[in-house]
Image (cartoon, grey):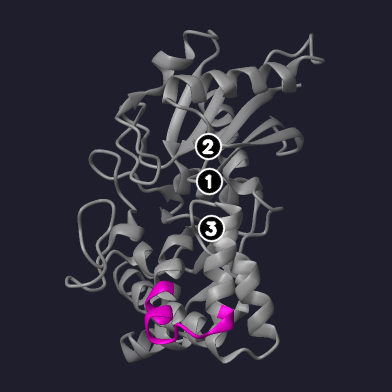
Amino acid sequence: MKLAIGIDIGGTNTVIGLVDHKGLIIKKKTIKTKEHESPDLFFYAIYIEIEKLTGRFTDFKPIGIGIGAPNGNNFTEEIINPPNLNWPTIHVPTILKKHTDIKVLLTNDANSAALGEKQFGVAKAMNNFVVITLGTGLGSGVFVNGHLVYGNRGFAGEMGHMSINPDGRKCNCGKKGCLEMYVSAKGITQTVKNLYLTQPESRFLNELLGNAKIKDVNGNVSGRDIDRAFDKGNPTAKKIYEYTSKKLGYGLSQVATLLEPEAFIFYGGLSYAGDRILDPAKKYLNQNLIPFQRDSFDLLLSGLNDGDAGILGAASLIFNSNN
């Protein structure tokens, strides 16, 4: 039995999984990404969790560790100044080799999710698709003609940093108007803050912002709270998601015009909003397309269990490298 470790590093949580070659996740563990003072301490904590996960498998040593990380570069094996983590550029294998001699492979977290969907999820039969990760920020992994697109230096597919308004919100990357500043947990939080300035008496907005401070999830509002209010007909919740959907639909239209994928596949915490966001997003997508391209693209939710696409894709880096 071949086993690999798949690791999905997010802006809030990191998921570590022990995976077999058929895509079965035998065990997994979630840790908080930002609870550690430095990348070295973070990766030491990951090593400890790997030891716990593999402890009872004395006859089956994992054949490698695959990692999906924000700004992870498959070519250089570096995580390069991830804006939502405030880390410097780090060479991941160098850090992990202090603790283990197992092979380490790295890619962007959204690329990892795309690999997971292609090998084990709804994209199995697709050759052209885009996986969009909706979490603290917004990432994307692009498949064209059956191949993951890395680009010349490994940075292709940064849809979250595609500007939809050059005079818009300031992004941590230094640019203005990046899509992730509107369509992500932090983007929606900024939308809520902007609405609060015009509706300071709104009980719903006060609750959203108050809960964000109490829960301290990177200071971001809870999408689940918005979902519940939306389902009860709350007009402010509907306004938040309508605004978010409009920005998402416009961003999708730019990518669809250029790449013409079969589908956009959504993964991550914000994707739980489902049709609350995706139905109006499809409307705005079609409004911004060339007429003969309209109604040609599916907007799908990940076909994998909660949080699994990233670790399955990371593990597939290892399995595919051993074929």
Please name which of the two marks, 3 or 1, marks the residue nearer to the observer. Answer: 3
Q: Which residues are magenta?
A: 193-204
Please name which of the two marks, 2 or 3, marks the residue nearer to the observer. Answer: 3
Q: Residue furthest front?
A: 201
Residue 174: percent from the left, percent from the top?
20, 53
For the residues marked 2 and 3, what is the alpha-carbon distance in whole angstroms?
18 Å
Q: Nearer the viewer, residue 98 or 66?
A: 98
In the rendering, which numbered label is found on residue 12?
Answer: 1
Q: Could you tell which of marks 1 and 2 lies nearer the N-terminus?
A: 1
Q: Amino acid at mark 2?
A: Thr
In the rendering, which numbered label is found on residue 109?
Answer: none
In the rendering, which numbered label is found on residue 33?
Answer: 2
Marks 3 & 1, CB-CB < 8 Å contact: no
The stretch drawn in magenta includes residue 196: yes
Marks 1 & 2, CB-CB < 8 Å contact: yes
Question: For residue 164, which quarter of the picture?
Answer: bottom left
Q: Nearer the viewer, residue 302 or 138?
A: 138
Is the residue marked by circle 3 packed among few (<14), some (14-19), or many (20+) residues within 10 Å? some
Q: Amino acid at mark 1?
A: Thr
Q: Residue at x 59, y 73 (%)?
A: 207
Is the residue marked by circle 2 packed among few (<14), some (14-19), or many (20+) residues within 10 Å? some
Q: Is residue 184 left or right of residue 238?
A: left
Q: Nearer the viewer, residue 225 or 290?
A: 225
In the rendering, which numbered label is found on residue 213?
Answer: 3
